[in-house]
Image (cartoon, helix red, strand yellow):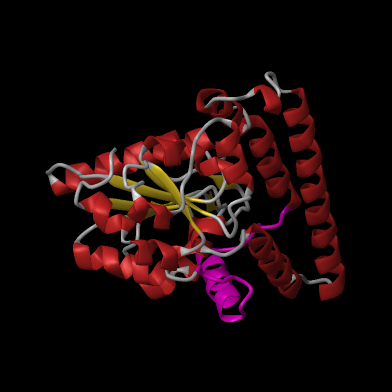
Amino acid sequence: MHLIFDFDGTITVKDTIFQLAQSAIHLQAQRSSSSSSSSNGSLQTKWDAIVRTYADQHAAYAESFSPPQHERCDPAQELAYLASLSGTENASLDRVEASGLFGGLTPEDLFRMGRERVQAGDVVVRDGFVETVRLAREKGWRVGVISVNWSAAFIRGVLHPLGDDLPIVTNCISSDGTIHGPEGFNGGVRLTTSRDKANVLSELLARFEHQQQRSPGPTVYFGDSTTDMECLLKHHGIVIAAEQSSSLMQTLERVGVRVPHVGSAQDGEAAANIAWARDFREVLESKVLERIANGLATE
């Protein structure tokens, strides 16, 4: 069996892009030949503008898309909309590159940022995740991470206690400050959308199958946002959400996908292909992974 995890908001309690950006602003200020406050203020101003522009352009695109949200009532329509967001997402990454936010930063710098943000308590790994990975390793299940985050090195810094053999497929930041897609996946194109993640998931599973030289068994995908939707619906999916009213849960309900809580499987809903949990502790306590591994849930 394979357990594949989204990173931001799934493995971590909150999205970490803000923390990545703030770490870069702080380090660039330290290294600047000008005063730290001046450099910090300049990059912070650019970052704030990037965030505002992204929000405005995303809202404008969503408003102009046809069919509009209230008319998208099945998964295929929603997935088509999500796949179409590539232009908006990449335009924002281009603005990040142009800002110079990550210029001159090495993978070692980015790794250290991730590690230090965890140590400071700014990035928190969700309850039960480490134990879930430990269970997977004990059972011989393959584990991997697929993310639209900007830095594989930053993610490795956050997850370094789990070792360096954890497959992490995400974007990478070069020392010239450019953001590019993962080498060997998705044709090297940046990962920005639900469709990109689904492409990478298929490629990663094919590699696992080739390495094992045997039937791969079921796949369980964990995610928290609409960028995870295609992966969640393609395999066994577990939505991670602090509350049942999360944005992704509302989207799934709108397109007609019923998502029971993982604990409900013990009450006759074991056949559900998708479920939700507040954290990985609930996943472990529900024994849903064991049921899937033993073929007690449908594919």
Compared with 35, 77 (above or below) is above
Residue 142 lies left or right of residue 15; in this view the side is left
Compared with 190, 15 (above or below) is below
Within the image, what quadrant is residue 79 found in? top right
Q: Position of residue 118 (x, y in %)?
A: 56, 75
Q: Position of residue 67 (x, y in %)?
A: 67, 19
Residue extending farthest bottom: 119
Residue drawn at (85%, 57%), measured in percent from left and top? 45
Residue extending farthest top: 66
Residue drawn at (30%, 46%), measured in percent from left and top? 219
Magenta-span inclusion, residue 112? yes
Judge by depth and name the residue closer to the eye, 76 or 277. Answer: 277
Q: Where is residue 295 in the image (x, y as percent from the top left)?
A: 20, 46
Stretch of the chain drawn in magenta: 100-126
Judge by depth and name the residue closer to the eye, 39 or 86. Answer: 86
Within the image, what quadrant is residue 53 found in? top right
Judge by depth and name the residue closer to the eye, 76 or 29. Answer: 76
Residue drawn at (77%, 28%), measured in percent from left and top? 63
Q: Can residue 26 be seen in this view?
A: yes
Q: Where is residue 152 in the image (x, y as percent from the top left)?
A: 48, 57
Judge by depth and name the residue closer to the eye, 88 or 215. Answer: 215
Magenta-span inclusion, residue 108? yes
Number of numbered discs overlaid on the protein picture: 0
Residue 22 lies left or right of residue 182; in this view the side is right
Residue extending farthest front: 267
